[in-house]
Image (cartoon, rainbow, N blue to C red):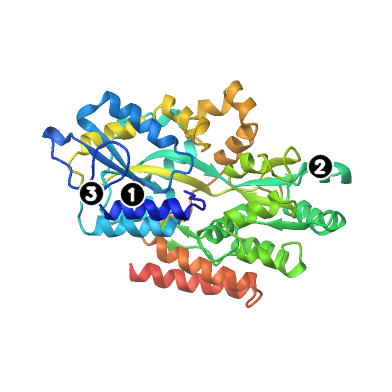
């Protein structure tokens, strides 16, 4: 899941949370218990920048007066969202009934016993894009339901490539050549992703490694596999770009928004980012509006493999109204609401049929490319200790990108550190 800059709104949401209130549905404080696991609920999420979710919940509340939902929006940054959720869950609080969680947290939350297993037959999982369902499982059981998906895309300056007589790249070699030769001729930097040491760097690293045929972890975190030649090849692609200059050094400070702004302001030829960037880069005031194209991420010999982003909906194990919570999740993952997720929230839905809807494709031309990317994408490394894994990957890979160690020594170091994390578990 990605929460963009909305610090003021995030702080307001946090203040309301501490005061025991958040704005949709019922008042805050302790929720009255209901018979048979039914009653009012609280849905906790990261900041909803478009405000679409309030309208969706308003419709639920109108038809479910005894099971009204209060929306709690936590601060902007994903790590802060996770920290506040974890603090509440560890205490055994039933304050949050339904949690909108990053797909990477599902395994951790399930292993800790914080979210309840769900009945697969209650949800339309067969109508979803197949890879997204895997993000909601742990230990062979469904512990959440996919709500929003995401996959990395390669944005490119269509106007520049057309003037240069070039096609968008399908392989790393083509991307490297165009970033090194075409970009400087037009006063542009070559390529950027999200390379600051945070969650985005873990994503970019995992994409490079799996595109090269490697993995970071296997067997739901029990086996460390990052010390492979394929993993080293993936890391060499990124570190070589910085060393040779077609990835600018300032990209080592980029998160999603910084990289999007660099592309949108006409400073980059190529950008790896999520689908949300498409609408913004084509929006009013953008220097590249009408001049950009989108293709799947490249790999060593053809299209590569993205990391699956997005979020899943889960029921707090300590919820006093789990039946109502499960019904709310079924409503939020229905085809009707999933259409609103896209059209009102500008977020990629999990329903497969929506990607082939002619009206939606006209409105969101990137949908076929996004569907292709999602179908070949993979979840982030599954582990009940994902946060520790995440921090280790960030630290080691950023050292390698900064040329403080070689790719070979980096993957060997990362293998050791991840094995130590696995042993501590």
In 3D space, how far apart are the residues under numbered discs 2 and 3 (Cα atoms)? 52 Å
CB of mark 2 within 8 Å of CB of mark 3? no
In the picture of the structure, the residue carrying the numbered disc 3 is 95
- Counting the numbered discs, the total is 3
Looking at the rendering, in which quadrant would you find the C terminus? bottom left
Is 109 left, or right, of 303 in this rendering?
left
Q: Residues within 10 Å of mark 2 (few under 14, many from 20)?
A: some
Give the percent coordinates (x, y) of residue 302.
Answer: 70, 46
In the picture of the structure, the residue carrying the numbered disc 1 is 139
Give the residue furthest to the top. Answer: 358
* Picture layout, residue 302 above or below residue 184: above
Question: Residue at image x 44%, y 43%?
Answer: 48
Question: Residue at image x 23%, y 41%?
Answer: 27
Question: Residue at image x 46%, y 73%?
Answer: 417
Q: Residues within 10 Å of mark 3 (few under 14, many from 20)?
A: many
In 3D space, how far apart are the residues under numbered discs 1 and 2 (Cα atoms)? 48 Å
In-front residue for pair 42/304 = 42
């Amino acid at each position: 899941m990605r929460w963009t800059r909305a610090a003021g709104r995030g702080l307001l949401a946090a203040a309301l949370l501490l005061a025991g209130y958040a704005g949709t549905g019922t008042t805050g404080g302790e929720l009255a218990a209901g018979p048979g696991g039914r009653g009012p609920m609280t849905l906790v999420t990261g900041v909803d920048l478009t405000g679409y979710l309030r309208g969706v919940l308003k419709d639920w509340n109108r038809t479910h007066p005894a099971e009204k939902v209060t929306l709690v929006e936590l601060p902007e940054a994903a790590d802060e969202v996770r920290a506040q959720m974890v603090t509440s869950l560890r205490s055994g609080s039933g304050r949050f009934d339904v949690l909108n969680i990053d797909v990477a947290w599902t395994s951790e939350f399930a292993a800790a016993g914080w979210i309840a297993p769900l009945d697969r037959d209650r949800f339309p999982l067969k109508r979803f894009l197949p890879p997204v369902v895997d993000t909601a499982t742990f230990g062979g059981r469904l512990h959440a339901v996919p709500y929003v998906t995401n996959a990395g895309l390669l944005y490119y300056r269509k106007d520049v490539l057309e003037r240069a007589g070039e096609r968008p790249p399908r392989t790393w070699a083509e991307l490297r050549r165009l970033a090194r030769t075409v970009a400087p001729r037009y006063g542009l930097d070559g390529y950027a992703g999200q390379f600051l040491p945070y969650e985005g760097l873990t994503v970019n690293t995992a994409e490079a490694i799996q595109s090269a045929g490697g993995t970071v972890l296997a067997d739901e975190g029990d086996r460390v596999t990052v010390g492979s030649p394929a993993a080293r090849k993936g890391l060499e692609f990124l570190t070589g770009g910085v060393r040779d200059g077609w990835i600018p050094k300032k990209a080592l400070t980029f998160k999603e928004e910084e990289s999007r702004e660099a592309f949108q302001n006409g400073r980059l030829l190529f950008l790896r980012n999520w689908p949300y960037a498409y609408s913004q880069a084509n929006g009013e005031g953008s220097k590249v509006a009408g001049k950009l194209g989108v293709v799947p991420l490249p790999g060593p010999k053809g299209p590569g493999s993205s990391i699956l982003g997005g979020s899943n909906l889960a029921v707090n194990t300590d919820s006093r109204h789990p039946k109502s919570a499960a019904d709310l999740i079924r409503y939020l993952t229905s085809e009707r609401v999933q259409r609103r997720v896209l059209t009102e929230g500008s977020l990629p839905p999990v329903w497969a049929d929506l990607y082939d809807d002619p009206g939606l494709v006209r409105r969101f031309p990137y949908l076929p490319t996004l569907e292709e990317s999602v179908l070949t994408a993979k979840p982030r490394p599954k582990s009940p200790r994902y946060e520790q894994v995440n921090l280790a990957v960030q630290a080691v890979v950023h050292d390698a990108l900064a040329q403080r160690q070689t790719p070979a020594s980096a993957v060997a170091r990362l293998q050791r550190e991840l094995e130590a994390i696995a042993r501590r578990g």
